Image (cartoon, helix red, strand yellow):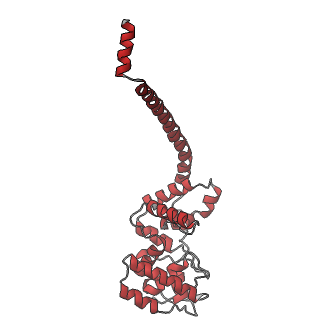
């Protein structure tokens, strides 16, 4: 009788549904803990060799690639071009660490809504890495994680102005023009420092499609892209509305004989 009474008291204090809930909670906690350990371990084992590979890339190649070219220093590049470049390619350049997660989320959402992949979220640092290490990335365990680790290394080693300088000297602008000096002289007969707002936007617009946005071969396509980038520059506060209107009225005219004036 005493045992039955005691059992009854326990049942009243700790009913069946609570014991089931406690059992589920304990089992659930154990399962989550085990899964977390598996995920962390797997992530580490996946990440470690790729991070080690990223550490093995020689970042001095960023400098050596331009050793035989007439390299332009950051202070020798028009601020209009830098602003156009940032507006067109990487508006959050100065606030992210090489990976623009905010822009990635936005691009994914926009692509899902449009059911395509027209929106991108690459960064200038990421583009520089791909240009500098294209062959190595193809040959040595291609992986998005290797790219990310390498981008982080570049961001840790170089300041933002150095990254912009190196990238500006590597961009292909079509017609055999590599780098901002060749493009400014080849298309507009100017030094990079002398580029106007309109010319800077035109060159920045050529980066993603240097052939069909060439001011010499496809001036109308070049003008339309230039106008889009000028609008972005005004949106991001690099130029005012009056400058935007004046720049859009300027025609895009490439020189017939490549060269530049200091």
Q: Quadrant of the C terminus?
A: bottom left
Image position of 35 with respect to 84: above or below: above
Q: In the image, is 158 to the left or to the right of 134?
A: left
Image location of residue 12, percent across then percent down: 36, 20
Along the viewing direction, whichever of 139 and 22 lies nearer the viewer:
22
Image location of residue 3, percent across then percent down: 39, 8
Along the viewing direction, whichever of 220 and 178 lies nearer the viewer:
220
Q: Residue at x 53, y 71 (%)?
A: 67
Image position of 83 with respect to 133: above or below: below
Q: Residue furthest right?
A: 139
Q: Is any atom of residue 94 visible in this view?
A: yes
Along the viewing direction, whichever of 147 and 10 lies nearer the viewer:
10
Image location of residue 39, percent across then percent down: 52, 41
Q: Residue furthest top?
A: 1
Q: Is any atom of residue 191 visible in this view?
A: no
Q: Quadrant of the N terminus?
A: top left
Along the viewing direction, whichever of 27 and 5 lies nearer the viewer:
5
Q: Residue at x 52, y 52 (%)?
A: 55
Image location of residue 72, percent across then percent down: 47, 77
Q: Residue at x 45, y 92 (%)?
A: 249
Q: Quadrant of residue 112?
A: bottom right
Q: Quadrant of residue 68?
A: bottom right
The number of numbered badges drawn on the structure is 0
């Amino acid at each position: 009788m005493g045992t039955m009474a005691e059992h009854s008291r326990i049942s009243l204090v700790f009913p069946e549904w609570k014991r089931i809930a406690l059992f589920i909670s304990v089992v659930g906690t154990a399962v989550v803990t085990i899964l977390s350990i598996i995920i962390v371990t797997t992530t580490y084992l996946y990440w470690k060799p790729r991070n080690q590979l990223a550490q093995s890339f020689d970042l001095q190649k960023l400098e050596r690639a331009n050793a035989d070219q007439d390299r332009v220093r950051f202070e020798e590049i028009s601020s209009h071009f830098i602003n156009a470049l940032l507006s067109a390619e990487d508006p959050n350049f100065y606030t992210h660490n090489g990976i623009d997660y905010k822009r990635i989320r936005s691009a994914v959402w926009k692509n899902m809504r449009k059911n395509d992949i027209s929106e991108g979220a690459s960064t200038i640092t990421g583009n520089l890495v791909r240009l500098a290490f294209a062959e190595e990335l193809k040959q040595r365990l291609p992986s998005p994680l290797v790219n990310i680790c390498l981008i982080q290394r570049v961001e840790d080693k170089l300041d933002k102005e150095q990254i912009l300088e190196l990238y500006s000297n590597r961009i292909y602008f079509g017609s055999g023009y590599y780098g901002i000096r060749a493009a400014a002289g080849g298309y507009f007969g100017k030094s990079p420092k002398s580029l106007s707002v309109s010319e800077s936007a035109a060159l920045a617009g050529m980066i993603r499609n240097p052939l069909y946005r060439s001011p010499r071969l496809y001036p109308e396509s070049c003008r339309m892209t230039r106008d889009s980038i000028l609008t972005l520059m005004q949106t991001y506060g690099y130029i005012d509305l009056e400058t935007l209107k004046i720049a859009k009225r300027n025609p895009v005219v490439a020189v017939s004989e490549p060269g530049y004036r200091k």
